[in-house]
Image (cartoon, coloured by chain):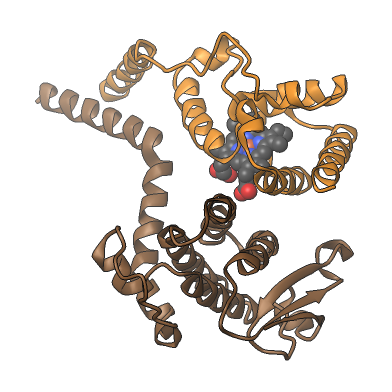
Amino acid sequence: MKIVKIIAWIALIALVAIQFFPVDYNQSETIPQTDFMLVNNVPVTVEKSLQVSCYDCHSNNTQYPWYNKVQPVAWFLEGHIKKGKEELNFSEWDSLTIRRKTSKLRSIIKQIEGNKMPLDSYTLIHRDAKLSESEKKLLIEYMSDLKENLNN
Amino acid sequence: MKKVKLVTTIMVMAFISLTAVSCKDAKTDKNDSTEHHSEMNADGDHSKMNHDNSDGHHDGDKKEMAMNGNGTSQVVLNDYFNLKDALVADDNAKAKNLGGTLAKSLKAFDTSKYSDDKQSELKDIIEDATEHAEHISESDIAHQREHFKVLSKDMVDMVEITGTSMTIYQQYCPMYDNNKGGAWLSMNKEIRNPYFGDKMLKCGKVQREIN
């Protein structure tokens, strides 16, 4: 019994202690000129979906409500942001060539179609980030149009 | 005694939290190294390559060069064809390895003998193609084929610039990707479909003969 108690205490202490570990918050003051929303004429509905469902991991600006600041959630998010931004960074969209944009748009469409993005592990906590069927349809249509127009 | 237990528990806790944080990266590392090993057997047919050694020296590590020839578009094309054959054979694991090989030869591709204009276009193509090849090296076969479609377009555009000494065929199957179609390059006129593999091996036609 004593052991259980000790472990419980240590777990608690550890949980408190990790709260003091520093986290690199992924936040920037300004929106760069290359931002996806700035360079494209994005309808409000699409903008909202992207902002809520994708921008946390795929831009230079993550929203940090309190639960995103709590460890180990913050760590978990930090890892995803790093990998996510390597794959796709909406903040730096316009620095890509037409070829790269076309590739990314294709990939975005496939990820949404296949329900792979946003990541399940993320929507578990961020319920509002889950895309409804109509939101998915809207995003896919928008991204497909954008892709067509790039190559004309 | 109590102290020992305490210390052990703390160490276990620390260990668990560290693993929790780092497990993802560790997993990818392991994948990378296994790929490394099997790669050499998987594409033993580098002998087929044109060892065009006209421009001699290259930077980059010696071992890499020994394995990948010397960073020409021909090496890239050969690796692409090997990858295509793995997809034709529905061989996910082999395609993974060959995707990794292709990513490396793309990175080693030396564009310095081309004009500035062509260089910047080639670099664009290489960057795009490398990313597709890297994805192919770590995904399931359906996802590999998605990336292979865009990779194939990169290869077509590359050959447009670099040319090639071989006769190659641009082939096309209209049924892939929900009937949006998919093209690929092949050294053989005969159709062997990399998008469907065994399911529809013969879907497609020759669109264009290059050379």
Judging by colour alone, the chain drawn in brown in this rendered image is B
Q: Position of residue A120 (x, y in %)?
A: 65, 37
Indicate whether B108 appears above or below A31: below
Q: How many marks?
A: 0
Front residue of B50 and B194: B50
Residue sitting at x 59%, y 52%: B121
Q: Can residue A120 be seen at all in this image of the molecule? A: no
Q: Which quadrant holds residue A3?
A: top left
Q: Can residue B87 be seen at all in this image of the molecule? A: yes
Q: Which quadrant holds residue B110?
A: bottom left
Residue A131 is left or right of residue A8, and the answer is right
Residue A117 is left or right of residue B55, and the answer is right
Residue sitting at x 50%, y 69%: B73
Indicate whether B187 appears above or below A37: below
Q: Position of residue B150 (x, y in %)?
A: 68, 59
* Quadrant in which the N terminus of chain A is drawn: top left
Residue A101 is left or right of residue A40, and the answer is left
Q: Residue furthest front?
A: B115
Front residue of B115 and A40: B115
Figure colour of chain A = orange
Indicate whether B87 appears above or below B15: below
